[in-house]
Structures are given as C-alpha cells and as structure tokens.
Image (tube, coloured by chain):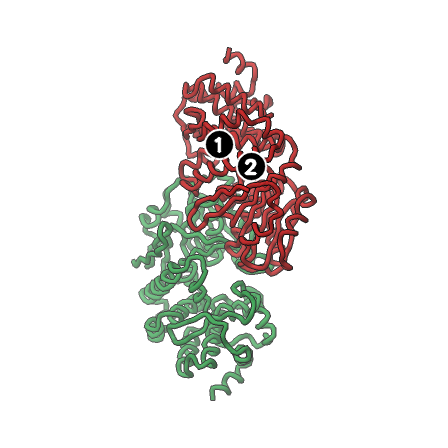
Chain colours: A red, B green
Amino acid sequence: MKTVTVDLGDRSYPIYIGRNILSQQNLISQHIHGKQIVIVTNETVAPLYLAKTKAMLNTGDLHTVILPDGEEFKNLTILNQIFDTLLENNCDRQSTLIALGGGVIGDMTGFAAACYQRGVNFIQIPTTLLAQVDSSVGGKTGVNHALGKNMIGAFYQPQCVIADTNTLNTLEDKELSAGIAEIIKYGLLGNEKFFHWLEQNMSQLLARDPDCLAYAIERSCMDKAEIVKKDEKEGGIRALLNLGHTFGHAIEAAMGYGQWLHGEAVATGMVMAASLSEKLHWINAEKYQKIEKLIKQAKLPIHAPDTMTTQQFIELMQRDKKNQGGNIRLVLLKDIGNAVISDDYEATLLLETIEQAISHNARKSSKE
Amino acid sequence: MKTVTVDLGDRSYPIYIGRNILSQQNLISQHIHGKQIVIVTNETVAPLYLAKTKAMLNTGDLHTVILPDGEEFKNLTILNQIFDTLLENNCDRQSTLIALGGGVIGDMTGFAAACYQRGVNFIQIPTTLLAQVDSSVGGKTGVNHALGKNMIGAFYQPQCVIADTNTLNTLEDKELSAGIAEIIKYGLLGNEKFFHWLEQNMSQLLARDPDCLAYAIERSCMDKAEIVKKDEKEGGIRALLNLGHTFGHAIEAAMGYGQWLHGEAVATGMVMAASLSEKLHWINAEKYQKIEKLIKQAKLPIHAPDTMTTQQFIELMQRDKKNQGGNIRLVLLKDIGNAVISDDYEATLLLETIEQAISHNARKSSKE
C-alpha cells in the first residue's frame, strides 16, 4: 500500500492507495471519531461494494443513502435526501459521512458533510479512476444548478481517502480511459518524466495492471497535492489544473452532459490546448504529435464533435467561471511538463485551433 | 461612528456602528471588489431601506432578490432563488452579496455567499437589533431543514457589517426587546460592569436613545468577537454564547417557530438558567432577583408558557445539537458575568427549575 499525504496544515489528510485495501478494517476506523456513520452511494456502486464497506465498519449506528446514478441528479433536491437521512437518525456533529462511488457521489457527499451542522467528518472511497486521481485531492465539493455546473459548493477536506485499485476492475473501458485523461494531464502540466513513463506504460495501464495503476494514481495525487498546497482556494496556480478543461467544458455543454464523459472532453481539450501552443510556437510540431499520440493510445478522442460550430465553442468557453472579461484565459503549454495560464494570444489563432479540431481534415492538412 | 474589529486573521472584518451611516457611500464601497452586486432583502425591509441602499452603490450591474419575510422561508428551496438570480445575471467570483434585513436574511445570504462558486464576497446590513448584536459577529450562516433549525450551513465571515441605528426606529417594540435580550446575555455571561450599565440605562435603550443603542451594540459585538476569536468553529468556549438558548429553543419548538420571538425565548431561558444556578448555590437569591428584574424591565417574558409540560421540555432540550449523550449540557452562572458549561447537576434540580418556570406560583412560593 502507498500513502500520499495532502499537506494542508490542520486540514492535512492521507490518501491510501493499493490493492484490496477496502478490506483493511483498521485503515478506516482510525479516522472515525463519533458513533454515527452514514454511507452515501448510488444504485450502480451499491450492489458492488456496499456490503464490503459495511463489513469494515463495526458500529450499530450505520445508515445508508442510495442515490440514483448520474450527473443529472447532482443538485440541491437530491442533496437534501442526505440531510433527511442524517436528521431522521438524529446524527450529531461527531457523525461521519462516507462517500462510496465516483466523482458525483464524492462531490455531493463532501458538500453535505461541509454543510451538515456546519461541518462533520467526511471520508472518501472513490471507486472510479477519475475520482481516485482527481476528486481525492483538492477538497472541491458541490452540486450543479440548472444554469451551471458545480456552481454551488464548498472547499472541504476529507479525513482520509481510500483508493482501492480493485474497485477499478468493474469499471467500463471508456471510464478507465476517462480517468487516464486526467493522469496524462499531470504529466503535461508539470511532470515531463511522468509523461515519458506514461508513454512507456500505457498498455499496462489499459490492461489494469494493479502496480502500474497504483503508481499512476500516487504520482497524480502527489502532483495535484503539491499544487493545491500552494493554492487551496484557487487564487492562482491551481488554475493550471484546468488544462484542457475550458475547451472540454464547451464540448460537454454543447453535447449535453453525459454524452461525452468528462475525461474524454478534457482529452480533446488538452489536444486543442497543445495545438494552440504549437501555433504560438511555444511547443514544436514533434512535441504536439507526442501529446496527440499518447492521448490516442489511451483510447481517448482527439477531435471535437463535428456537430459543433466555432461560434458555439467560443460562446460556451466565454461562460467559463474563471473569466473576468477580455480574451479567454487558457492553460497552455510552454513545453511538455510546463503549463502557463495566458490570455496573451492572437484571437485568430484560437479560432483556427477550434476550426481544425472540429474539421479533422483541416488539422491534417496543416500538419503536412 | 464606532468601529469594532472582529479579529480572525485573514478573515478579520470591521463592524461599523452609528446613526445614519447607511448613507455614507465610502463606507461600503471600499469593501466591494468586483462589479456585480446582488442585494438580498425581504418584503418588509425592501420598502423601508432598499432605495437608500441602492443609492449608496454606484454600479450598473446591481440586482435585487426580495424574499418573503419569515423564519418559515429559511430553507434550501428559497435559498435557490438567490442562486437563480446570481446565475441568470452571470455573476462571477468577484461578485458581492449584500444582506439587507434581520437574522433570517443575514443567515441565508451569508450561506448563499459561502456556497456560490464556493465563496464570494458578502456584506451585512442588519436592520434589527438582534441581528446587529448577534448575527454581526461569528460567521454562522445557514438554513433550516424540516427536521431541525439551522441544520444546514457554513461558517463564513463577511467583508464588513454596517449597523445603522436609524434602521431600529422602524422596529416593533417587541422586536427591540428581543434584541435587548441578547444584549443582556453579554452582561450575564462575561461582563458584570456591562450588566450594571444595563440596569442603569434600560429605559433609555427602550426609548431608542441612539447613543445608548450604539454603546450597547458596540459592547455586545466586542464581547462576542472576543469569544469567537478564541473559538471560531465552536469547539469550546463559544458554547457559552448559548446561555439561555437550550431552554429557549425548547420553548420555540414547543410553541411553533414565530409564536415566541427568539429573543423572548432566550430571555425566559436565561431566567431559567439563573434559577438552576441559584438552586446549585452558585449564585445567591439576590443576584437571581437582579437578573429576573432586568429582564422584566426590558419588557421580556420571565416565565415559560404554561401550556408546556416538564416532560416535553426535557425531550426538546435533549434534541439540542450540542448534546453528546448523558445529562443535558447547559450554560449556567457561577456569578453575574461568569458563565460555565456544565452537565454536573442533580437531574431533579433541572426538573424543579422547569416546573417552576411553567407554573409561576410554584416559583413565587419557593422565593418566600
């Protein structure tokens, strides 16, 4: 088992990563302080891992909330079901909420823990690769509003995270790839060595080799923890974690959430960010191609949906919550392993990047 | 104008207290950083102070949310109306939310500010005496749940508080007295000198003398700020602020929220806490009578509703969110100006206290 410590002063916590660690009772019990526990999970994950999780917790005061599965249920109304269960069972301030599931369950449970009686204990058991590398670090919790994704939430840190690589065996292939997209992001934005490791180990990752998975999760969590430590509330460099996301969010919004997985949209977004960086002569054609190749190898999309228009792309990108007026601020690459936040580019180059991403041939011809 | 600084490190902020300070444009403008402002108020306060508040804010991007007035609207559904307005107007992370109203408006607006995009600027303009002395300090924000009061919320500090004593001129007499109950609390729990000042100045306070009001507000905010500074998240001594509240909450719950004003219930609760303290021989009969007399002088109730039973009182008190099993933890008095948190008392003395509070004659005869 590997342990990554997220260092945030009195809000520091460990991420445990390993094979079958969900069965290690002492791991979780040391992070539970009160008597009352509520597990929040969904209809997909409950049949797979709920019994195993319950077996690990020796308390008589254990309750479960099983939510419907999907991003469309990540809202205030469904959140209230968690509060209902907490109050119906007279849960006090020493209670612990456990999130068992992917990113949606983690975000909602974390937000419920942040708000219930103004803050109770919270433990994460992420069961998707994306949640293990992404939601494990950073404390971003929240729900969607009809008019915007993740618009209502809190920064709230868990007591610990248990990332059991065995839970990834039940994951669909495209969910696995979506998780790998975020892993590639860490190589691209700040860790060239890790990028090369990924080039060499992609086939083992796709084959779900437990040691390879554990290493990739550990590396991603460490890199993310380093950034979050420097900027917990996203005042500055934490925005680098949005590499590929401004493009990606536009794709998700245009296609309707759920059509493209978040990781797939981010993958295409990273290719687009690399493409614009190449046009700015910040990276050369060879590096651009390495990036595109690795993302393709991970079985992720490298082109934007051809049903989108450039106009639509720009409008959706402008709606991004990081904008403060002016040119769209983007995370771009000065090199593989060196990302920067910039709005200092010719607007026409952005338009060209989008046009090429939508119309694959155009991109191809520009490379000839 | 008086200024009390609430000292909480990088979350410190000033409370401005004075006559007609709502008209001082520079006061508020220095605490607004972005361009977008949303004022949240209610149907009662809007006709009185909304135009004045708007006049003070010179921005083109100003929006208003007018909520229905009352504790029964302090819930997640009504909270969502604030998010609707923020999102419909594309408010960004630099936006400022202004709470214009009493405690309910302050709690809801503060919670909306804590959650919108995981935290935006927040300014409080409390227009009731209770809100000026109580909600101004401490950062407690939140909404009610069908199964419990203030069960969903956050600790979130404002940029500043503007307590204009002129707004108290439109307050009903019983609302004024309810605010004075919380002011008396600060004398009782830690400031004997202030208790004596209140004994001497109660009639001027009731006559709404602006200088007297400003002094009482300043003193209460300073005393509360001192306690909150030591214990921002209510791990320890902050619980002293609940003097009278455990008894008071039981009265509010039994009578249905809104029947007794919060301050009225707290007033009776403080008399009951003093009565139990006398039974424990922690304070003598003379001090008990001084307390009862001051509360009576403030036109506040000193007896619990005679429709309540002792059994009901105990059950409702046990539901209090500060309980962790065992005897009910109460804030009691070792002296006027010296409160302690204790569950070290004979259970029969608590029963006797409640019986006397419900049945006035019993109390009277015990004093003879």
Tag of residue B31: none
The percent position of residue B164, horizontal first and vertical second, equals: 36, 58
Q: Nearer the viewer, residue A223 or B116?
A: A223
Residue drawn at 58 percent across, 72 percent down = B314
The percent position of residue A1, horizontal first and vertical second, equals: 55, 42
The percent position of residue B192, horizontal first and vertical second, equals: 35, 73
Above or below residue B301? Residue A106 is: above
Furthest residue toward top: A368
Which label's residue is closer to the chain start, 2 or 1?
Answer: 1
Q: Secondary structure at mark 1?
A: helix
Q: Secondary structure at mark 2?
A: helix
The percent position of residue A49, horizontal first and vertical second, equals: 66, 45
Residue type, label 2: Ala
Task: Name the side, left or right, on which A122 lies relative to B185.
Answer: right
Residue type, label 1: Tyr
Residue drawn at 65 percent across, 41 percent down = A69
**Residue A145 at least partly seen:** no
Furthest residue toward bottom: B368
Residue drawn at 35 percent across, 52 percent down = B9
Residue drawn at 47 percent across, 79 percent down = B275
Give the CA separation, mark 2 to mark 1: 15 Å
Mark 2 chain: A
**Residue A167 at least partly seen:** yes
Residue mark closest to the camera, 2 vs 1: 2
Tag of residue A214: 2
Task: Name the side, left or right, on which A274 lies relative to A265.
Answer: left
Q: Nearer the viewer, residue A6 or B248?
A: A6
Q: Residues within 10 Å of mark 1 (few under 14, many from 20)?
A: many
Q: Which residue is mark 1?
A: A186
Mark 1 chain: A
